[in-house]
Amino acid sequence: MKEGGRVGVLGMRVDARTRAAEQLQRFVEDLGLPVLGFLRDTQNYVQLAAHGLTLWDVAPSRVAKDVEQWQSLLEWVER
C-alpha cells in the first residue's frame, strides 16, 4: 500500500491584504499547491514562546486574531 502525503503552504508574517500576499498566493497556486492561510507578524508568538506557551494557553481575548488565522490550517489538517 502506497502512503501519500499532502503539502500546503502557510504564509508566515504576511498580511493577507498586501501585494506580497497576492504574489505569494499566485506563485504557490502556479506550483499546484494550496495556500492554507497567512499568519500575521505579531509579538504574540515571540512572547508566548519565551514562556513556553502557545496561543491556546492564554486568554482567548488576548490572541483572538491569531487563533482566527489558524482556523483554515486546522480545518485542512483535520481532513
Image (cartoon, grey):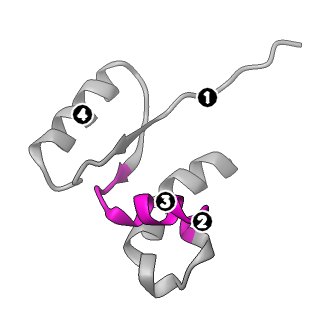
Asked if the stretch drawn in magenta spans residue 54, the answer is yes
How many residues crowd around disc 2 within 10 Å: few (fewer than 14), some, or many (20 or more)? few
Q: For the residues marked 1 and 3, what is the alpha-carbon distance in whole angstroms? A: 18 Å
Q: Residue at x 48, y 59 (%)?
A: 70
Name the image quarter holding residue 58. bottom right
**Which numbered tag is attached to residue 53?**
2
Q: Residue at x 61, y 61 (%)?
A: 52
Magenta part of the chain: 38-55
Q: Position of residue 73 (x, y in %)?
A: 52, 51
Q: Amino acid at mark 2?
A: Leu
Q: Position of residue 75 (x, y in %)?
A: 59, 55
Residue that mark 1 sits on: 6
Depth check: give the residue in front, 5 or 67: 67
Q: Position of residue 62 (x, y in %)?
A: 43, 82
Q: Is residue 28 left or right of residue 53?
A: left
How many residues crowd around disc 1 within 10 Å: few (fewer than 14), some, or many (20 or more)? few
Q: Secondary structure at mark 1?
A: loop
**Which numbered tag is attached to residue 70?**
3
Q: Is residue 6 left or right of residue 34?
A: right
How many residues crowd around disc 4 within 10 Å: few (fewer than 14), some, or many (20 or more)? some
